[in-house]
Amino acid sequence: MHEWALAESVLTAAVETAEKEKLKKITEIKISIGELQQIEQDLFEFALNEIIKQQDKMLKNVKIIIETEESVLKCKNCGHTWKFKDMQKKLKENEAEAIHFIPEVAFVHTRCPRCNSPDFEITIGRGVSITSIKGEK
Amino acid sequence: MDTRISVIDKRLSNIKNVISVASGKGGVGKSLIASSLALILSKKGYKVGLLDLDLYGPSSHIILGVKNVLPEEEKGIIPPKVNNICFMSIVYFTEDKPSPFRGIDVSNIIIELLAITQWGRLDYLVIDMPPGIGDETLDVIRLIKKSRFLVVTTPSKVSMAAVGKLLTLLKELKLPIVGVVENMKMNNSGYVKNIVSKERIRYLGSIPFDTKIEEAIGDPLRLYKTSFMKKLEDIVLSNNIING
Ligand SMILES: Nc1ncnc2c1ncn2[C@@H]1O[C@H](COP(=O)(O)OP(=O)(O)O)[C@@H](O)[C@H]1O
Ligand SMILES: [Mg+2]
Ligand SMILES: [Zn+2]
């Protein structure tokens, strides 16, 4: 499961930020996961918990809040906007999986539903990010 | 906040040496040299990885004849072993379809690949770079601090003009340059050697145009036997490019 690598990146980044801010403890991390990356939330949370267990004091009893963000795409050619959800069903399994690993290959495997252009952008909901961190000094 | 950058150093922490095969110009032999260098190092018994960062025109998989393999998922993705080389490329995810990426996407892909690829222990990671000094080069400079640069040119003035710009940039940033290889040499002009030496950069040597190379593309066992490969091996050994 590659969710592990993403979970590890979230916690590494959180600890790094906390150290920069001279926090002694992180009490809460709010994480956003963009639909495009099709994260298995169970696996992701499992990985987060496992890594937190291995970590010492900084992350002890941290509260993790996960929000999913709808993925919106916008065509640079014709201006049309659409949601990844709407086209997900049409994808072949291997294409969906490739997008799961590298969201940008959406430009390889999908097209603008209106004008068929590959020149669109991911407006929101690409992948994993931290939206906020709370802690104690 | 983008969390992926933080974990990249950790992913690369067990890699002893990184050599990026770069050029200001396309079509000069970067991919052939990168793949062949990986083969040479692997034959010498080193643990070797090869990362193809030419996202628009990936070629290493063609040179090595990589077919029907995909990375395994294990706390990230594990590059499949091809001829004993851990090989990572965007082709696993594009199925070799055209890849119309904008600059920001290129950057995102490189960051994602570096954040999720589990290389494990490597003596050498060789990177097959795309031409020029755009996103890929800037991202390698930014994200892979231990990279050294092996620069490839052809004898042409046109090639050297673009390569000179890359060398100037690398020097300005005080980045380690392994040296310059002059590839596809057809006469004994000293043009490239003079320019490179004047810049106080190591001229590693030249590789003649090898008319038989095309027949060996896609077949590492045949590649090992080409005069191209022998010459590259000479260059690698005589310049002490291998240092453990
Ligand atoms: N020394 C050489 N002799 C003959 N052909 C070569 C030599 N070096 C490279 N080539 C060929 O030139 C072409 C471009 O090489 P490639 O490695 O793809 O360049 P780049 O990665 O710089 O764009 C390929 O077909 C390759 O096989
Ligand atoms: Mg190439
Ligand atoms: Zn459109």
Image (cartoon, coloured by chain):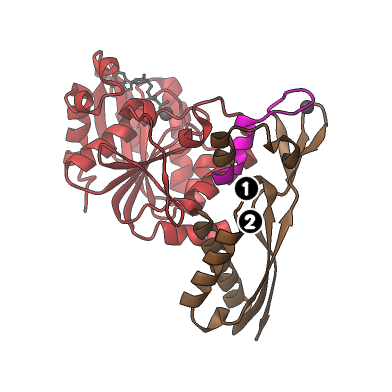
Chain colours: A brown, B red
Q: Amino acid at mark 1?
A: Gln
Is any part of residue B63 visible from this angle? Answer: yes
Tally the numbered discs.
2
Q: Say whether residue B189 is magenta.
A: no
Mark 2 C-beta to ligand 3 under 8 Å: no
Residue B239, horizontal then vertical, whole percent: 21, 42
Q: Where is residue A104, by image quadrant?
A: top right
Q: Amino acid at mark 2?
A: Val
Q: Which mark is residue A128?
A: 2
Badge 1: few (under 14), some or many (20 or more) residues near its Cα, within 10 Å? Answer: many
In whole angstroms, how far apart are the C-alphas of marks 1 and 2? 8 Å
Residue A37: mark in rendering: 1
Residues in magenta?
A100-118
Please tell me which residue is depicted at 38% across the width and 35% down the height of the picture. B69
Q: Please name whichever residue, A41 or B3, is drawn nearer the observer in this view of the structure.
A: A41
Q: In the picture provided, is A122 more to the left or to the right than B169?
A: right
Q: Is mark 1 within 8 Å of ligand 3?
A: no
State the image coordinates of residue B228 (x, y, percent, origin top left).
22, 24
